[in-house]
């Protein structure tokens, strides 16, 4: 299977430095530093040439993925770099442009309306461009003298987000490498808060701890919650899953019953994690009701709004996040519904003091006391990282350019598309709607002639779309007719430029692929 | 104090959207996606304009930092963005360019030869430019269909690094958000390996664990080791610090004695962490001797080569890392001695199976079994992150362009500079050398007239250099004449374009600042 018009489908081999015909010269100066005057000129020139290669390669593409299977791609990249990508001798600019061209030819094109699989969005041009500031200056926000301007910008970015979340002046926050990292840090704070109530456990380790810590979340919470519990030494069986209602939202009365069942002699409820935007459905737990239960039991509340955070910017969808201001901590992934290139996750805490015991350390070589007293303080004390990229710059540039209204309008557009997809699926005889849109996701199945073949065909039709490069849809397990997990398909619509007719075309492609898979299966039986 | 020639020192206020005179138009299309055809053009245009602003602003600078104190900068940024950086209405391209200009005016300029403080290097132009690929396409390496090309490139990058480290074909690795994260994951693997020997503790949590876990490292190991122990629930007192020799290297016989002292009934040695490039001195623990001790005791060995990893690329310095191939895991920070913009840390493991129990999970929506069997597998199972930026692209571009020889030559140049600094310090009557160069760091003190004033004056002279923007040197605590921690200064030389005369000028600036601080102190007393 080849992709018409792509250089990878031409009779020439995959791009290699020698095969690249771009009007390139060797790097003038291989060790050139980005922030030096000649380096800035080189960054600009090389970005121009990289973008030129990308634009040219994208013109030849026929879909959001290359028409290649994994083993084909492996072979092509092996051919492109027979000596690997860590050679002893450099090949200069040509090799960089060959990498760029092959990347544009064979990466997933999230700006293609037929890409609707995952929660990573197509990034905004303004964010991708402004991110070059982080790369050129390599500021690190851990200390003032590693990046004073970036420190100031991150402080203001966090402050603005705290206000949008409804937090008061005591709140603070920090950018993290991702939603999984934000959730980990939130549960670390919760663990240490809970255990500090018992005694000072931080200096005692696993052995000095007599009670069983428990973390409560819905059965649809992100797997990073359970993983964080394992990392933090709470054990994966620390998680107590709360059942959901028919709209895929945590049932507050079930949470209440579980919390009541905790034995004060042996159990230590550490936190409740509510989800604002489940990965599979985009469903939002009922935050005010959950918060009321949590308050009654005196447990911490963390809201994982990795996906749902975009509703903070939308008048239409903001009501979904009502109650978020009652959370002790909130995860926001701006590399999801604020259209940032990764990473741009944020952990907010209603009370800045939450950060102090866990990460508020002073280090002689980074933030000695007398420097801190003189105002030379960075953001080390908020983060589990040390060196930390100035991701705040691209995010601030985006909000300064578009405003929250501009970002919110993008989510509204995606929400409209998801509502449209919901209607189209419901109306299609070969598609069955499992869950309609809360944010920008719909879950459904291709209806097979033989119900017993549903899992196999739905999985295979998705891979067929991948392999032909025609479309990229998501998949997950959701309860089937018998209540057991069944393979489902999913559209995560995060491209606001997609049109309703594109969505219908995507659903048609799903049906055609399903019919083709069924025909092949029948043929192989016959 | 103002910085001559900078817009911030001019009688006009700090740059604001209205005050920026660049020939800018509003963003044509605020919601433009980077990978769309018009978006690519916009990225290129905006990068050109951003670089233009930066070049213009840098021309007006007089040193590596702006001649501003923290409170001055806060005031300027408040004036620049009176409504914060998360406004409801966007201001288009002009706001982005104002941000870029102010960033270039007031960030630390790591390409200035007088910046020699921290372990974050000036980034390479080729890396900063190639990083735009990560931003434009927003590939995520967790799943194949989120970024197939980036997955292939990261696999090859890791393979090349494993080979350089001397690992065999069973090794594997993963990029992480930083050295602290790499060390955390290494100790997580070590914790779970050690506890699995006792019983399956992962499902039992803190409470089900009867022995005291211990982690051994030198007293000069990075603080992220102790922090990782706290995060992992081992407790900060899990750390046993091993004394160092006169060259700031772990004493293997002291390690052996400590390990012998562990009580098999109550103690559980989890890992030994050797440091290849201490933050303060660049000293490298004697890896073969440490490895021999560790082997005898059957404990895991992690080598934190966050700083020292650059020696892998240098014929001259490679012998410092002899023995690293005996480590179970290694941390490499390519955003240190491979001149990458952050983040570009790597965790390598000699045995790929190390990753399986901790992070090798399968998730229905990301990597279901039947997709994995069909080859559609990403890198989720290696990482504690889920969405993960394609940092491998900039790193691969760098090595492809420069080769490891090119990167190694940069470290050699920095090593030469550090040797020169060592000699100049030793020869200067007002400077006292504490530690000479192993990699690219020297530690010293300004010699005060009054020995009792040494700490205060050394701290204050560094801040004086910061405030005048003239120079940026590091500081740390090192044992003074009485053996107690005393404030020391540090040059971390990571700019290969710096000349020996620049280093001498930097040292002169230190002495002048010291004299000035002393004169002011005497004046205030008189």
Image (spheres, coloured by chain):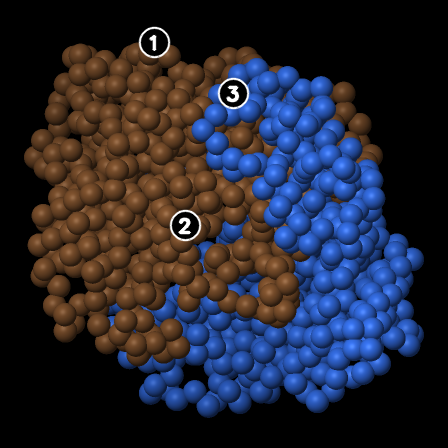
Chain colours: A brown, B blue
x and y percent of residue A61 in the render?
51, 16
Chain label for disc 2: A
x and y percent of residue A149 in the render?
63, 45
Residue B413 picture quarter: bottom right
Tell me if mark 3 has few (under 14), some (14-19) or many (20+) residues whose alpha carbon lies within 10 angstroms of its own.
many
Looking at the image, the residue that sits furthest to the front is B526
* Mark drawn on residue A107: none
**Residue A420 sits above or below residue A164 on the image:** above
Residue B472 picture quarter: bottom right
* Mark drawn on residue A169: 2
Compared across the picture, whether A488 is left or right of A339 comes to: left
* Mark drawn on residue B30: 3
CA separation in Å, label 2 and label 3: 31 Å
Compared across the picture, whether A32 is left or right of B236 comes to: right
At mark 1, the secondary structure is helix
Q: Residue at x 74, y 48 (%)?
A: B66
Chain label for disc 1: A
**Residue B184 sits above or below residue B364 on the image:** below
Look at mark 1 in the image and give the residue it sits on: A501
Tell me if mark 2 has few (under 14), some (14-19) or many (20+) residues whose alpha carbon lies within 10 angstroms of its own.
few
Q: CB under 8 Å between callouts 1 and 2? A: no
Chain label for disc 3: B
Callouts 2 and 3 on one subunit: no
Q: Residue at x 40, y 53 (%)?
A: A170
Q: CB under 8 Å between callouts 3 and 1? A: no
Callouts 1 and 2 on one subunit: yes
């Amino acid at each position: 299977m080849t992709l018409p018009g792509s250089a990878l489908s031409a009779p020439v081999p995959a791009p290699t430095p020698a095969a690249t015909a771009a009007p390139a010269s060797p790097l003038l100066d291989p060790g050139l530093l980005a922030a030096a005057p000649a380096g800035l000129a080189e960054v600009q020139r090389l970005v121009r040439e990289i973008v030129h290669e990308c634009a040219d390669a994208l013109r030849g593409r026929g879909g959001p993925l290359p028409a290649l299977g994994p083993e084909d791609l492996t072979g092509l990249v092996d051919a492109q770099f027979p000596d690997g990508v860590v050679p002893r001798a450099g090949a200069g600019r040509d090799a960089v442009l060959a990498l760029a061209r092959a990347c544009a030819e064979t990466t997933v094109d999230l700006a293609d309306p037929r890409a609707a699989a995952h929660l990573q969005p197509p990034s905004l041009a303004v964010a991708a461009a402004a991110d070059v500031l982080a790369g050129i200056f390599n500021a690190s926000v851990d200390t003032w003298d590693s990046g004073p301007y970036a420190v100031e910008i991150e402080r203001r970015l966090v402050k603005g987000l705290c206000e949008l979340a409804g937090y008061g002046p005591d709140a603070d926050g920090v950018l993290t490498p991702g939603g999984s990292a934000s959730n980990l840090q939130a549960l670390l704070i919760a663990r240490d808060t809970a255990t500090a109530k018992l005694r000072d456990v931080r200096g005692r380790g696993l052995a000095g701890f007599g009670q069983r810590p428990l973390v409560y979340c819905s059965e649809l919470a992100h797997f990073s919650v359970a993983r964080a519990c394992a990392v933090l030494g709470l054990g994966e069986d620390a998680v107590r899953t709360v059942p959901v209602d028919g709209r895929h939202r945590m049932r507050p009365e079930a949470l209440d019953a579980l919390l009541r069942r905790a034995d004060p002699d042996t159990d230590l409820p550490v936190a409740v994690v509510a989800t604002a935007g489940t990965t599979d459905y985009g469903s939002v737990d009922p935050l005010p009701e959950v918060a009321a239960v949590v308050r009654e039991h005196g447990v911490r509340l963390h809201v994982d709004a990795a996906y749902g955070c975009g509703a903070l910017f939308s008048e239409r969808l903001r009501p979904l996040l009502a109650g978020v201001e009652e959370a002790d901590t909130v995860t926001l992934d701006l590399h999801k519904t604020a259209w940032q290139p990764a990473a741009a996750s944020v952990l907010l805490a209603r009370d800045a003091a939450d950060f102090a015991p866990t990460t508020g350390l002073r280090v002689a070589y980074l933030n000695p006391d007398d420097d801190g007293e003189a105002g030379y303080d960075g953001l080390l004390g908020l983060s589990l990282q040390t060196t930390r990229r100035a991701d705040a710059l691209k995010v601030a540039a985006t909000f300064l350019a578009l405003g929250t209204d501009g970002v919110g309008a993008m989510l509204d557009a995606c929400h409209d598309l998801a509502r449209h997809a919901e209607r189209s699926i419901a109306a299609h005889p070969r598609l069955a709607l499992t869950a309609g849109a809360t944010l920008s996701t719909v879950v459904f199945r291709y209806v097979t002639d033989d119900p017993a073949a549903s899992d196999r065909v739905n999985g295979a039709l998705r891979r067929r779309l991948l392999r032909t490069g025609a479309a990229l849809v998501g998949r997950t397990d959701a309860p089937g007719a018998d209540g057991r997990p069944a393979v489902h398909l999913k559209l995560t619509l995060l491209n606001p430029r997609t049109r309703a007719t594109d969505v219908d075309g995507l659903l048609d492609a799903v049906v055609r692929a399903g019919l083709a898979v069924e025909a092949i299966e029948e043929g192989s039986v016959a």
